[in-house]
Amino acid sequence: MSFLFGNRSSKTFKPKKNIPEGSHQYELLKHAEATLGSGNLRAAVMLPEGEDLNEWIAVNTVDFFNQINMLYGTITEFCTEISCSVMSAGPRYEYHWADGTNIKKPIKCSAPKYIDYLMTWVQDQLDDETLFPSKIGVPFPKNFMSVAKTILKRLFRVYAHIYHQHFDSVMQLQEEAHLNTSFKHFIFFVQEFNLIDRRELAPLQDLIEKLGSKDR
């Protein structure tokens, strides 16, 4: 949640995506923040009683986008075309970008370029009222869950890149507590609703197991 970052004037990578105040989704976000404040992340990710699953996933997806946006924004000066000429998460995992619309065939590109493509693409999905309706009573489309899964799968890759390639910088900036809490929240959420295939999580599997065992 964005409240994890206090009131520091954090640089975000892309403009923050705001949920309109007074809307039901805004109330859901406030509920999530209050539950997170209790410190029990497993409970915080559960679907609140009587709420719509799609809406809960939509609100949290927007929030994870904002969190990752902020986290990546703090280390952009270290993630350059020279230092990160490919988008990777350690030596065994490399990602090539395709969005199926503008770039149909996957292209190899630097991490900053890939993350720029990725965050711009996510932003476009979140801004699309037919995919992420913000007005009460407007139904979610039939393909919503599959779009949300793709967004979360791609956002995971930014966490994976930061952990593998930039954790030293994160520690120098004393941001590791924010990164770890944000990632733990993200992982508990996607596990609760089975939103990312286990194979996709492989680059951070050891960390995921460690975070999970600490919480048992």
Image (cartoon, grey):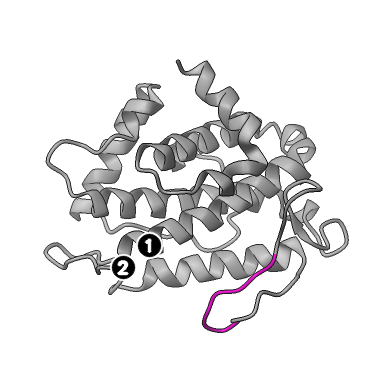
**Label 1 with label 2: CB-CB less than 8 Å:** yes
Residue 16 located left or right of residue 46: right
The residue under label 1 is which amino acid type? Ser
Which residue is outermost to the bottom?
102
Residue 117 in the image: state x and y as whole percent. 61, 70
Quadrant that contains the N terminus: top left
Along the line of sight, the residue nearer the viewer: 49 or 93: 93
Residue 180 located left or right of residue 17: right
Question: At 69% from the left edge and 46% from the top edge, which residue is drawn?
Answer: 162
Q: Is residue 111 magenta?
A: no
Residue 31 located left or right of residue 168: left
Report the disc number at residue 143: 2
Residue 6 in the image: state x and y as whole percent. 49, 36
The residue under label 2 is which amino acid type? Asn
Report the disc number at residue 146: 1
Along the line of sight, the residue nearer the viewer: 207 or 125: 207
Question: At 74% from the left edge and 38% from the top edge, which residue is drawn?
Answer: 167
Q: Quadrant of residue 193?
A: top left
Residue 133 in the image: state x and y as whole percent. 25, 67
Secondary structure, mark 2, is loop
Position of residue 92 relative to residue 94, above or below, is above
Which residue is outermost to the right?
82
Q: CA distance from mark 1 to mark 2?
A: 5 Å
Secondary structure, mark 1, is helix
What span is colored magenta in the figure? 96-103
Prevailing secondary structure class for the magenta stretch in the rendered image = loop
